[in-house]
Each structure stands twice: as structure tokens, then as C-alpha cells.
Image (spheres, rainbow, N blue to C red):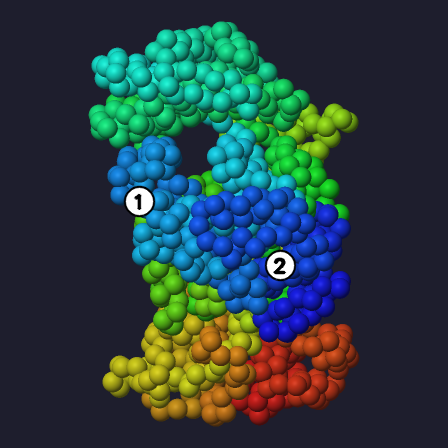
């Protein structure tokens, strides 16, 4: 442990913190010391969670030390229930005086990870509590057998109230002797409860009031009904929202409700069943209990006896509300609905003769009735709540609350009521309804109440008296629209760079495919088969260069399905599976879990790795950790804009435009929100590539819209300065170079075909390459194939030049090659420096996009490979050709070497003493800039200028600069990069230099 003093607070940290971690903790402490809200962005892998925990708990300890409780007691040394009650009263006073930390994340699984981090710190003895629901934590056998969560919740509550739960009773008796680990998550609490026969739920609740830090999911804070049920007190609390990039959506969902005509029918049917049941069960049992049941409404102390008459009145109110809802004129088209302001919902209730006071009474009667029914179900299973019945009644209860409580808070401007007709079959599929529940109707009316402003919920939380509100994530960008939406001040802000070096991440925008087809996933282009095919061929290339695991993200499930179907129909998918084991994200949770397990196993086992195709905002885009070999590359295939045709999106954008035009309620515009939704999802997906300080990976943005400067400004800060635009060939070369830098060269494999035996001959068995060089089993291929004498046929020679633009590709002449179709028949001159005679091969259309192979390596090592020194030599005569774009087809080409989509090639004039073109120099400079340090790059540019202008008389200065580079890796890489651009008059001189370097390519 190390101790660091930050703003006068001593912070214990598990190791020496980095500068960006100190900056992060400084902002956390600043917010807590000044009672300010904070917005903190720090990329994944920067130790954000550790910084949050250590800084906040260090501040809390210092605050408690300087502000001791005003009441002291020695009750903790006493035993017995009375001492505990006295201690509890004192602790309640203490909890209102002193702040505590509420740490919230999206799911319990994320909180488990946070609690594991806490165990690593010097604050692992802090008082900790984790909140879960009764249905999650109740271990009573009778409760677990009940059919649904509402029934379990009420049964658990009734057993405790009647003191008929052995786990709860044992907890009271054993509380003084229990020795619980200070930091225990829900799974550990349940396991502990079963071992010691005590209630995990109340064990957790017993520690909540006095805990220094309480862990819970987001919705416990934002959802008003959950907050009431849990009796969660936010007064003087430090609320930390981790993974806060989704906080806006969670805020809106917490105050959004929906009910259908089927829900109303089910609720009416349930209330009617209650009436029948109470009558049949006799006056001495259920009727007596119903008359004794009371309920306090809104703290006003009104005591209501639940009688058969009042239950019948509730049924009448439900029937009248159903009638008023059915009277609303709606189109039969499910995409055409009616939008109304929130007060319209109150009017619907008033038409059903449900006034404010009466509505409040019936609200309480409803829940008292359900309590009665739960008691009856314990005695008689036939009286148990049927599945979805309690949920239907809950929905009606929620609508009463939003109509009569929220409407009087002048908050109606943040809500809209939307009514539409929906296909019942869709409802059954979506929510698992059975045929009986769906009754006999084919269509159902749906009434939705949508909260359209996260600011409403956020203001409600802040108004609860929180000490500070901290929102943090690795991907909050773009931030300005978020600040406008949340509508609360964030006086402390931080946007950290990444902890990694710039050399650990490669970020490239590739706007066109290998066939020069523009890549854009826009709505107007999504039906283009040519685009899908081009994108698929491009991904095949990327899968060749990127080792191990690759994640490919689409803008929507439909876009992904359409592309995969096209690729399978045109055999592109087969080419992908030759490179990687491919998985397509399943919408079934169980199947997805199996896919994920297999994906991790394949990547960690080595070999060719695996690729996972998913969707931005989908399962693999967040909540799943893909460290190291599990995500060496992330490919984004488009901008995931929300669907403007969805009713809620349309209503949201209309609301934002109205608010934007109104000076009193001005927020962000609909366009700002629309763009932020897309870019937030993109940034979250890109964050999968780097998970810790030693990780490395590549991010590929495969859509021409990413090329715009305005688009790049929307990226997270740590990516913004690294992103570059690339042509497709240069992107492949740059990607190969990037991963080559992080490779450990394995023993070279010499593969050739011996014509006498017609069998592949290898000098090493450690890495086996396909004899026809269709693909290499190593992560990114073999250096011997990339550099020199291993090239045994047309396929191989094309690979050497495929990193150039199509119109400048060089090929040897050989039987059956592209150039035979052009009337060129002169055979290639080959001189192979090893035994056996090499045979020429014929390239296929699918092989045109194969990569220039790179060194083989172990992806886990970071040592620098050295070029092979074996004397291998190949003499080729390059001839230029270009694809003929005057005739395009969807059918496979009949000319060997010409890709699908093109019919023919045309010859390009050979320049005997050519000078590199401006765009060529630009491409190569972009690649070399990422390889060299600043001084090396400056020296190289100095000697390239005379080469470009044609004033150079020798390559002496150029070679001298290359040899001066700090590592052999840089020398080898730059040497290969420059070989394509050396004027012919210098090729002999350059060939001698390459021979000395071990890269022996002679041009004649």
C-alpha cells in the first residue's frame, strides 16, 4: 500500500498511483469537500473504480474523524435485544448527521466486480452493505415455490410480520455472535445465510443504516416505488453512479409506465376472483381478516377497512377506466398513435369517477386486498395469485401514482401520454403471455406514459438532499448534450486521457473497401448488396491482419442479419471462418452465454482466434470484459442512430424541439440528442479494445461518415488524437505494422511445393502454413511469405503488392494469370534459393484481397522480432494493371485474379523512371509516422523530399537515415514500406541495402 496526500486527505492506494489516477482522485475529493456534483470521464483500464473507492472512503474517514458523532454510547459492549434497539436509535441519529456513500452501477454483476476491487484496498475493513430485493435474497423454501416475484415479495413480508420465518427469527437471536466478512456481495450473503440459517435480506438491511458504503443497482435510486419499498434515505448521501453513460436512459425508464387493455382485463378478472374467493371462503375467515386489514395512505393516518363493498367499488373503477380508455378513437395501424400531455391521463381517471381523494383511497385498497390474498394463498394454493395478475394490477397502481402525485408537482411538461393499438401476438411473444392470458382479442390498446427528460429524475434525486452526486464512466463523450439533458449543475468535471501509450492503440477510419466501393451504413444504402459484399471482403482482410479476438459491431440487429445473410450467400462468410471462428450475437440469453464462453476459450487457447459479430448497445458492447487476446480489434461498421420511425423516438424528438424553442424550458435540440445517442454507443463499443494499462488493440471505423472532422470530435478524448483516415490498402499495411510491433517472432516456416513429390516441405513444424498460401494458421501470417524467396507463384507475388492501391498493383507473368487475359504471355523469371522446383499457381477471385503476410508471433509477447538472415532471392518483373470499372456485375469474375463485381482489367503504362505521386507519399508517410519517434520521422522526411522531387543522385542519405533508427524492427518495417516507391534508377542500390537487411527482393 502507498499513501498519497491529496487536497489534505491521506489516501491509501494499493500501488503507486499514476498521474492521471491522482488527478482523478483529486477531483473526487474536491467534489466531496465542496458538496458539488462531479462529471468524471476516465477510460477503461485507468483504475477508475479503485480511484473512486479509495478517494471517497479516505475523505469519509477524514470527515468522520474531524466531525465525531454528537451522541456516544457503550451499547455495543452490551448484549441483548434492548441494547441493540438502543444502539439502533443512536445509529439512526448518527446516520442523519454524517454522510455515507451510495455506490450504484447498472447491474448486480457489475457491483460484484466493484466489491472485489474494494477487497484489494486498505479500506476493506469499512462497514459495507449491499441491497437486493426480497425475491433475490429470500431463502425460505415456501416463498421460493411461489410462481412470481410479487407473490414472493408479499409472502416474505407476511411471514416476517407473523414471526413465522425461522431465518428471520434466527437472525435476531444470533446477531451478536455472527462473524460476517465486512465486504460480502449478494451471493456471499445468501451462502452465509444458508450455512448459518439466518436471513440474508435482513442481515443486509441490518447493516445498511450504519454502513460507510452501500452498494445497489441504479434503479434503487431512481425508481420511486423501489425507493419507497426499500425505505432508501438519500439525505446527506454521496451518490456515485458508475458506468454512468446509460444514466439518462435509466432516469427516463424509472418514471415511464405502460398498461394495455389486456392488462386491465386481467386486473378486472383478478379483482372479480378475489370477490368470489372471499365470499366462498366464508365470513369467519377471509371476511374477518379483510375487515381487520388497514392501510395508511400518504402518511395522513386515514385508516381504511377492506370490505367486500370496497373491493367491488375498486372493480367498478377499473371497469369504468377501461370503458373511458376504449372510448378513445385510435387508428388500427400500430405505427399511428395519439400523443397527449400528462393531464390527459388524469382526465381519463376522472371520466371513470376516480377523483384525487377517491383515487388515493382505492390505491391503498388495492394493495391491502393483495395482502389479504397473499395470506389466503398460504392457506389455500387455489387462492394464489396467477402469473401476470399481480403485474397487471401493479401497472394500474403506477398509473394512479403518476396521474395524481406527479401531476401536481408541475412536472407534467416532462411527460407525454401515448396511446396506440398493438398486435396481441407480438405482445405474447415479447412478454411470454399464454393464450389464456391474451383472451380472445387480436389487438390490444396500449397506454404509455413516457418520461422524456432525464433531468426530471435527476432533479428529484438531488432534491432529496444528497451531499454530492458523482457520475463517472469511461465513455461520457460527447459531454455537452449530456449536461443539457441532466439539468443539474456539475461544477467539478474531468476528462482523463488514457493510461496507455499512443503506440498501444491504432485507430483508423476506412471509408472504402478493397474494390473502392464506398462504405456507409446509412438508411438509404443499407439495401445495397454491393456495399454489403465490399464490407465483407474488407472484414476478411482485417481478420487476416488482426490476431486473436475481434469484435465487429453493427448499427442494428437488422443490419447485422442482412450483412451476414449476404456473406453466406456469396461465400464471403466461408472466407471469414477460414480466418477466425465466427459467432453472431444471439438474442437468447442462454445461447449467448454459451457463445461467450466458447469465444473466450478459443481466444485464450491461441491459434487463429475468434470473431464476435454484435450490435452497438447490444450484449457485447457493455457489461462484458474483453481483456487482452479477447479483443485485439474492434470494428465499427456504421453509426448506430436511433430509429426515427419508432414512436418513442419520434415523440422524444418532438418534445426536445418544443423545449428547445421555449426559453423557459430550453434544453438540447433533437439533433444534438440524436447524434449523442449514436456516438455514445460508438464510444462504448470502442472501449472494448483496451481494458488495462498493458493491453493493446486496434479500432477500425468502417464508414465514410467517420472521415469528417466534426465526427472525430465526438470520439472519446483518448481516441480523438489517434484517429487517422486511411485508404483500404494502406490501412492493411498499417495494421500489420502495428501488430508486428507487439509480436514475438516464432521460428520461421519455409513452405514450398516440391514438384517431384507434390508434397509441402517444411523446415519447421512449430507453425504450419497452408501450402497454397490461402491463409496462414499463425495470427498474422509468416514473415517469410511477406518478404522474399518464399514466393512461389502468382498468388504470392500479388500478396507482396496488394498493399498498394488497385491501380498500382504489380504482378508477375505466369500461365493462367490476369495478364494472359490481356494477351501477355511472357513467363515470370524466378530464382529460388532453396531445393525443389516451384510451380506457378493460378489466383482465384477470393484471393485477390488476401493480405501481405507478416511475421508469425506469439500475441502475448512484446519483444522485437528480427528479420530472417537466410539468403533467399526472388527476381520478378512487375507490370501494372488496373480494374476496369466501365463494366460492373454482381456475378463472380471469369478472369483469374479479378474480384467479384468486375469483368476485366486494363493495362497501365509502365514508368521506367517514375517519381512517387503526392498521394503515394502521403499514404506511406501516414504509416511511417506511427512507427517512428519524432526525431527519426523528421530525419526521414528530410531525405524523402529530394527523392520525391527527383533531385537525388543516390540513396546513400536515405539508407543512412534508415540504418540510424533505434531498433531493427523500425529498420525492417520502413525498408519494406519504401521499397514500392523507389525510382527505377535506384533499385539496384536499394536491392543491395535490402540484401544486407535480409529482405532480398530484386527488381529487373
Question: Residue 479, can we see it?
Answer: no
Position above or below: 370 against 936:
above
In depth, the one of 520 and 611 nearer the eye is 611
Q: x%, y% of residue 804?
A: 56, 68
- Relative to 696, does residue 157 appear above or below in the rendering? above
Q: Quadrant of residue 345?
A: top right
Q: Quadrant of the N terminus?
A: bottom right
Q: Position of residue 835 (x, y in %)?
A: 35, 91
Q: Is residue 723 above or below residue 824?
A: above
**Foreground residue, 602 or 269?**
269
Rendered residue at 66%/46% (across/down) = 97
Q: Which residue is mark 1?
A: 166
Q: Secondary structure at mark 1?
A: helix
Quick check: 686 left or right of 493?
left
Q: Which residue is mark 2?
A: 57
Q: Which element is circle 2 on?
A: helix
Instruction: Report x, y in % for residue 714.
Output: 66, 50
Q: CA distance from mark 1 to mark 2?
A: 36 Å
Q: Nearer the viewer, residue 689 or 64?
A: 64
Amino acid at each position: 500500500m502507498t499513501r498519497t496526500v491529496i487536497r489534505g486527505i491521506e489516501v491509501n492506494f494499493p500501488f503507486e498511483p499514476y498521474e492521471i489516477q491522482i488527478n482523478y482522485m483529486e477531483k473526487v475529493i474536491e467534489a466531496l469537500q465542496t458538496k458539488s456534483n462531479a462529471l468524471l470521464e476516465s477510460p477503461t483500464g485507468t483504475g477508475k473504480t479503485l480511484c473512486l473507492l479509495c478517494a471517497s472512503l479516505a475523505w469519509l474517514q477524514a470527515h468522520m474523524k474531524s466531525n465525531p458523532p454528537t451522541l456516544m454510547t457503550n451499547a455495543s459492549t452490551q448484549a441483548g435485544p434492548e441494547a441493540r434497539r438502543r444502539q439502533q436509535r443512536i445509529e439512526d441519529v448518527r446516520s442523519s448527521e454524517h454522510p455515507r456513500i451510495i455506490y450504484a452501477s447498472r447491474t448486480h454483476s457489475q457491483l460484484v466486480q466493484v466489491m472485489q476491487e474494494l477487497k484489494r484496498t486498505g479500506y476493506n475493513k469499512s462497514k459495507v452493505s449491499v441491497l437486493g430485493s426480497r425475491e433475490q435474497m429470500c431463502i425460505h423454501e415456501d416463498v421460493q415455490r411461489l410462481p412470481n416475484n410479487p407473490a414472493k415479495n408479499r409472502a416474505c413480508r407476511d411471514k416476517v410480520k407473523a414471526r413465522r420465518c425461522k431465518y428471520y427469527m434466527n437472525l435476531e437471536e444470533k446477531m451478536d455472535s455472527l462473524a460476517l466478512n465486512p465486504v460480502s456481495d449478494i451471493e456471499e450473503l445468501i451462502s452465509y445465510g444458508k450455512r448459518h440459517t439466518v436471513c440474508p435480506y435482513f442481515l443486509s438491511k441490518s447493516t445498511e443504516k450504519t454502513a460507510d458504503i452501500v452498494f445497489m443497482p441504479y434503479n434503487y435510486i431512481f425508481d420511486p416505488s423501489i425507493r419507497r419499498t426499500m425505505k432508501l434515505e438519500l439525505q446527506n448521501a454521496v451518490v456515485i453512479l458508475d458506468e454512468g453513460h446509460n444514466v439518462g436512459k435509466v432516469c427516463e425508464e424509472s418514471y415511464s409506465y405502460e398498461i394495455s387493455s389486456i392488462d386491465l382485463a386481467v386486473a378486472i378478472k383478478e379483482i372479480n376472483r378475489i370477490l368470489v374467493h372471499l365470499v366462498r371462503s366464508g365470513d369467519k375467515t377471509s371476511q374477518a381478516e379483510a375487515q381487520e386489514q388497514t392501510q395508511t395512505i400518504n402518511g395522513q393516518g386515514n385508516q381504511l377497512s377492506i370490505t367486500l363493498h370496497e373491493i367491488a367499488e375498486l372493480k367498478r373503477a377499473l371497469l369504468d377506466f377501461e370503458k373511458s380508455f376504449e372510448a378513445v378513437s385510435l387508428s388500427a395501424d400500430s405505427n399511428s398513435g395519439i400523443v397527449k400531455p400528462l393531464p390527459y391521463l388524469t382526465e381519463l381517471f376522472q371520466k371513470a369517477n376516480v377523483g384525487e381523494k377517491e383515487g388515493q383511497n382505492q390505491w391503498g385498497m388495492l394493495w391491502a386486498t393483495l395482502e389479504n390474498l397473499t395470506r389466503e394463498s398460504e392457506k389455500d394454493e387455489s387462492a394464489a395469485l396467477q402469473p401476470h395478475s399481480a403485474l397487471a394490477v401493479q401497472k394500474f397502481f403506477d398509473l394512479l401514482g403518476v396521474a395524481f402525485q406527479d401531476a401536481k408537482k408541475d412536472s407534467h411538461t416532462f411527460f407525454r401520454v401515448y396511446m396506440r393499438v398493438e398486435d396481441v401476438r407480438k405482445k405474447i411473444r415479447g412478454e411470454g403471455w399464454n393464450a389464456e392470458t391474451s383472451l380472445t382479442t387480436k389487438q390490444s390498446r396500449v397506454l404509455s406514459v413516457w418520461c422524456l427528460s432525464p433531468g426530471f429524475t435527476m432533479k428529484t434525486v438531488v432534491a432529496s438532499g444528497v451531499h454530492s452526486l458523482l457520475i463517472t464512466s469511461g465513455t461520457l463523450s460527447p459531454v455537452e448534450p449530456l449536461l443539457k439533458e441532466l439539468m443539474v449543475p456539475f461544477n467539478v468535471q474531468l476528462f482523463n486521457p488514457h493510461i496507455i501509450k499512443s503506440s498501444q492503440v491504432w485507430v483508423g477510419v476506412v471509408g472504402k473497401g478493397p474494390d473502392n466501393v464506398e462504405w456507409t451504413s446509412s438508411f438509404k444504402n443499407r439495401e445495397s448488396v454491393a456495399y454489403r459484399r465490399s464490407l465483407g471482403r474488407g472484414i476478411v482482410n482485417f481478420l487476416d491482419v488482426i490476431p486473436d479476438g475481434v469484435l465487429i459491431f453493427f448499427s442494428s440487429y437488422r443490419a447485422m442479419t442482412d450483412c451476414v445473410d449476404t456473406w453466406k450467400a456469396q461465400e464471403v462468410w466461408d472466407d471469414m471462418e477460414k480466418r477466425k471462428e465466427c459467432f453472431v450475437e444471439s438474442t437468447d440469453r442462454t445461447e449467448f452465454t454459451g457463445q461467450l464462453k466458447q469465444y473466450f476459450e478459443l481466444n485464450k487457447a491461441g491459434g487463429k482466434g475468434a470473431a464476435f459479430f454484435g450490435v452497438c448497445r447490444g450484449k457485447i458492447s457493455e457489461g462484458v470484459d474483453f481483456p487482452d487476446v479477447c479483443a485485439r480489434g474492434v470494428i465499427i461498421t456504421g453509426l448506430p442512430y436511433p430509429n426515427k420511425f419508432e414512436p418513442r423516438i419520434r415523440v422524444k424528438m418532438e418534445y426536445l424541439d418544443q423545449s428547445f424553442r421555449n426559453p423557459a424550458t430550453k434544453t438540447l435540440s433533437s439533433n444534438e440528442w440524436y447524434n449523442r445517442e449514436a456516438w455514445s454507443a460508438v464510444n462504448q463499443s470502442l472501449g472494448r479494445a483496451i481494458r488495462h494499462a498493458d493491453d493493446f488493440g486496434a479500432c477500425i471505423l468502417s464508414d465514410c461518415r467517420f472521415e469528417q472532422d466534426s465526427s472525430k470530435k465526438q470520439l472519446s478524448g483518448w481516441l480523438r488524437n489517434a484517429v487517422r483516415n486511411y485508404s483500404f490498402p494502406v490501412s492493411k499495411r498499417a495494421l500489420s505494422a502495428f501488430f508486428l510491433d507487439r509480436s514475438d517472432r516464432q521460428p520461421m516456416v519455409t513452405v514450398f511445393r516440391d514438384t517431384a513429390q507434390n508434397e509441402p516441405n517444411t523446415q519447421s513444424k512449430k507453425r504450419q502454413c497452408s501450402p497454397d498460401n490461402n491463409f496462414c494458421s499463425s495470427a498474422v501470417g509468416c514473415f517469410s511469405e511477406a518478404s522474399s524467396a518464399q514466393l512461389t507463384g502468382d498468388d504470392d507475388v500479388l500478396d507482396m503488392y496488394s498493399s498498394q492501391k488497385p491501380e498500382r498493383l504489380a504482378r508477375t507473368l505466369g500461365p493462367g494469370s490476369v495478364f494472359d487475359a490481356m494477351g501477355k504471355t511472357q513467363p515470370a523469371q524466378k530464382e529460388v534459393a532453396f531445393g525443389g522446383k516451384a510451380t506457378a499457381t493460378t489466383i482465384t477471385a477470393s484471393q485477390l484481397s488476401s493480405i501481405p503476410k507478416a511475421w508469425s508471433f506469439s500475441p502475448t509477447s512484446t519483444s522485437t522480432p528480427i528479420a530472417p538472415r537466410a539468403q533467399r532471392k526472388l527476381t520478378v518483373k512487375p507490370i501494372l494493371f488496373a480494374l476496369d470499372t466501365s463494366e460492373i456485375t454482381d456475378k463472380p469474375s471469369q478472369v483469374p485474379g479479378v474480384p467479384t463485381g468486375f469483368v476485366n482489367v486494363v493495362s497501365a503504362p509502365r514508368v521506367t523512371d517514375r517519381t512517387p505521386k503526392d498521394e503515394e507519399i502521403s499514404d506511406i508517410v501516414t504509416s511511417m509516422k506511427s512507427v517512428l519517434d519524432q526525431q527519426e520521422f523528421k530525419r526521414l522526411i528530410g531525405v524523402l523530399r529530394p527523392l520525391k522531387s527527383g533531385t537525388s543522385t543516390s540513396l546513400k542519405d536515405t539508407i543512412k537515415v534508415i540504418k540510424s533508427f533505434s531498433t531493427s524492427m523500425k529498420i525492417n518495417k520502413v525498408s519494406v514500406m519504401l521499397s514500392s516507391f523507389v525510382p527505377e534508377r535506384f533499385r539496384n542500390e536499394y536491392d543491395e541495402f535490402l540484401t544486407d537487411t535480409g529482405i532480398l527482393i530484386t527488381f529487373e
